[in-house]
Amino acid sequence: MESMNRKEAGRIGIADVAAKAGVSHATVSRVMNGNFTVDQKIAARVRSAADELRYHPSPVGRSLARGKTETIGILVPDLANPSFQALLKSVSNTAARDGYRVLIADSSETPSEESILAGEARRRGDGVVLCAPRMGRGELEELAPSLQPMVLINRTTADGAPSLSIDYRQGIQELAEHLYGLGHRKIAFLAGPDSSASNAHRVRGLEEFCSRHPDVQLTTVPGGSSFDAGHRAAGDVLGLDITAVLAFNDLVAMGLLSSIHEHGAQVPGELSVAGFDDIPFAAYTTPSLTTAAVPIHEVGEQAWLWLRDLIQGVPAERRQPSKAIFKPQLQIRGSTGPAPHRPTDAPVAATGTNSPE
Amino acid sequence: MESMNRKEAGRIGIADVAAKAGVSHATVSRVMNGNFTVDQKIAARVRSAADELRYHPSPVGRSLARGKTETIGILVPDLANPSFQALLKSVSNTAARDGYRVLIADSSETPSEESILAGEARRRGDGVVLCAPRMGRGELEELAPSLQPMVLINRTTADGAPSLSIDYRQGIQELAEHLYGLGHRKIAFLAGPDSSASNAHRVRGLEEFCSRHPDVQLTTVPGGSSFDAGHRAAGDVLGLDITAVLAFNDLVAMGLLSSIHEHGAQVPGELSVAGFDDIPFAAYTTPSLTTAAVPIHEVGEQAWLWLRDLIQGVPAERRQPSKAIFKPQLQIRGSTGPAPHRPTDAPVAATGTNSPE
DNA sequence: ACGATTTGGGAAAGCGTTTTCTCACTGTAG
DNA sequence: CTACAGTGAGAAAACGCTTTCCCAAATCGT
């Protein structure tokens, strides 16, 4: 019955607390921000008024006044991909420790949407993590200046924005060498999205591998980045005269595996399969998947630490170097084995149950 | 050389555009918001000034003025869990269609953090989705009023906040009936986190199942919600005199499966295993996992649609009903089979390679 | 006991928009 | 030719905070 004259609007604001405690908004603000120039008595009064009213400062008002939101954006090509999920979790948890929240932007593998999404994500927060953007090089270069503070993952720009990369080039070579050591000479690469920069790195790595081993015969098959892409590509792969497949990533390898299974072919007996990333389930497929483990958790953690330095304006010399390359680690499991020596050059599928009739 | 007197601060704001176009901020604002009371000539001039300067309105300023952020929060117990990842993707993508962004809050299965996280997530946006909160009933009831607009998933409150639930009670009964039909009479339930409400629903369902089938002997084993939890629990489970296990969810089932494998026991020959959720990989374990499929994509979509109605203040009568229950669908796959009739009551492990010596 | 410091807290100026007022001007009708 | 809608755009008031400025009271030194 006391204050029917107050602005009846829903949210209770700093003014209400000030009134209730009999001080000015300024003082309430000071108390809420732990400014110790306020008398203990008054501070206590303000605090009790605040939580009697269940007052919480509006983040928007605060953001405007302070010029920062304590939020960052993260752009991923596909939120359904375990690798990006893991990265998201890692970035989110690490940033949370510093009181930052993460806003997600999922481009769903649509490169044309990326630059708009990236811009919005950036402006809504204090910085942005661009994870494996699919956009073209030119577009990225042009966009980069307007996006910083920004950390790139699996891409680089000329303007030297911090960039964390996985060494897919070396990783895939190690996988290839592993296959080579098992006697495989006819190998297929089930490629990722054309727009993926990391796919290009894998291709480069394989070229190096091939030039080192002229006796290897490598076939590249268009694939994709998803389980389904791997599943769909099985037909093409089985029609080839090969003894092993390197898939773009674990997801693709698993899709391939499951389809190969349906076709009745034996892994690794007739065909060896390797993935990339070492997602959580890779160890539990049948057979378990040989792959190259990417330390995705560390990548996410580093991404935040660097972004934080940028946001806080840490002077360049005290900052970490602006590039880091993480080495994948070979995980040899059950899906790869010795190359079968087939008397004929017949494609794998011919030995399977479902002949392509 | 023309405007060295301008505030040299980094960001360019509405004032700069106004100056450049020779109009007031008000007009710029009108143009940027597609208000057609502005003369074509002027509008064009403003627009070109705006994109020459690469001007983008500050979301923070805009949010303050408009009283809404076009952002929602989502609280999940564990971002590493495929079910919550799928929900996140679904909510995020659906909300994105309406121009809303999603802020994530991951409590990492720490119930005590939830209420703070929920509050912050809520205040940073226009609404919040609470996904399977682990907090106690009392805490939730108390928090609820301060959180709306809010949509709950797998929980309900007395104050009638919209709530989407999976009918775990029925789902687990169907799974149990399936096992019963296969001749299983001694069954174990590998339970989820105590704090999980959906776990309680499963327990209830199983009680009903048991009272319908007095000949069934059900043992409950403490577990958890993760792959590791399932893996760890294998020892306990294998020591039991049972022929089938119902796991809290697919993740737990998969962990269990992999450990059972290591112990050398046969699934489903010696022991049948069923999961819950039908996460993407459930179909590709060995053997493939019998489970109850949860339409998680639809849940996420509905969650946003309801939240949107709440945010936009759609009158209660034009709104959807405030509760929805989604029925899981039985997916019978390879991990469940006929109950073995063992001559003795010896526990499963005794037949395995690693006896618990 | 009186000026010189400190201390504490109110008033007010931002922060970057949107939006309501208000008013000058244009064109039309009487 | 005057009066009156109707238009279009500027001035200014929010929005909810933080923070600088500044002044009054309290504390100190001598």
Image (cartoon, coloured by chain):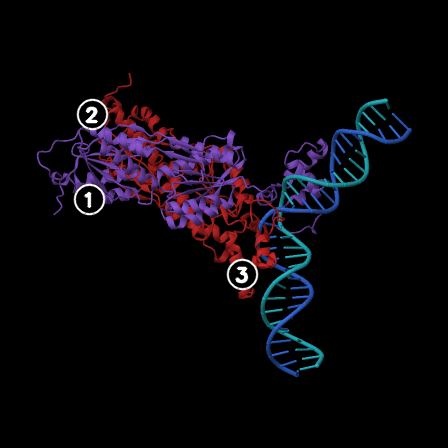
Chain colours: A purple, B red, C blue, D cyan
Question: Quadrant of residue B238 in the image?
Answer: top left
Q: Are marks 1 and 3 in contact (CB under 8 Å)?
A: no
Among numbered discs 2 and 3, the one appearing first in the sequence = 3
Taking B200 as reference, is A96 left or right?
A: right
**Which residue reaches farthest left?**
A343
- How far apart are the two marked residues, 2 and 3, measured between alpha carbons? 90 Å
* Label 2: how many Cα within 10 Å (few below 14, some 14–19, many 20+): few
Question: Quadrant of residue A52 in the image?
Answer: top right
Asked if marks 1 and 3 fall on the same chain, the answer is no
Q: Mark 1 against mark 3, which lies toward the viewer?
A: 3
Mark 3: amino acid: Arg
> Which residue sits at x=72%, y=32%?
A39
Tell me residue D8's x, y (percent): 59, 66
For label 2, the residue is: B343
Mark 2: amino acid: Pro
Please tell me whether residue B113 is drawn above or below residue A1 in the rendered image: above
For label 3, the residue is: B45
Tell me residue B17's x, y (percent): 56, 54
- Give me the chain letter of mark 3: B
Image quarter of the C terminus of chain B: top left
- How far apart are the two marked residues, 1 and 3, measured between alpha carbons? 56 Å
* Residue at disc 1, secondary structure: helix
For label 1, the residue is: A236
Q: Examine the rendering and report whether any part of residue B8 can be seen.
A: yes
Mark 1: amino acid: Asp
Q: Mark 2 against mark 1, which lies toward the viewer?
A: 1
Q: Examine the rendering and report whether any part of residue A22 can be seen.
A: no
| Numbered label attached to residue B260 | none
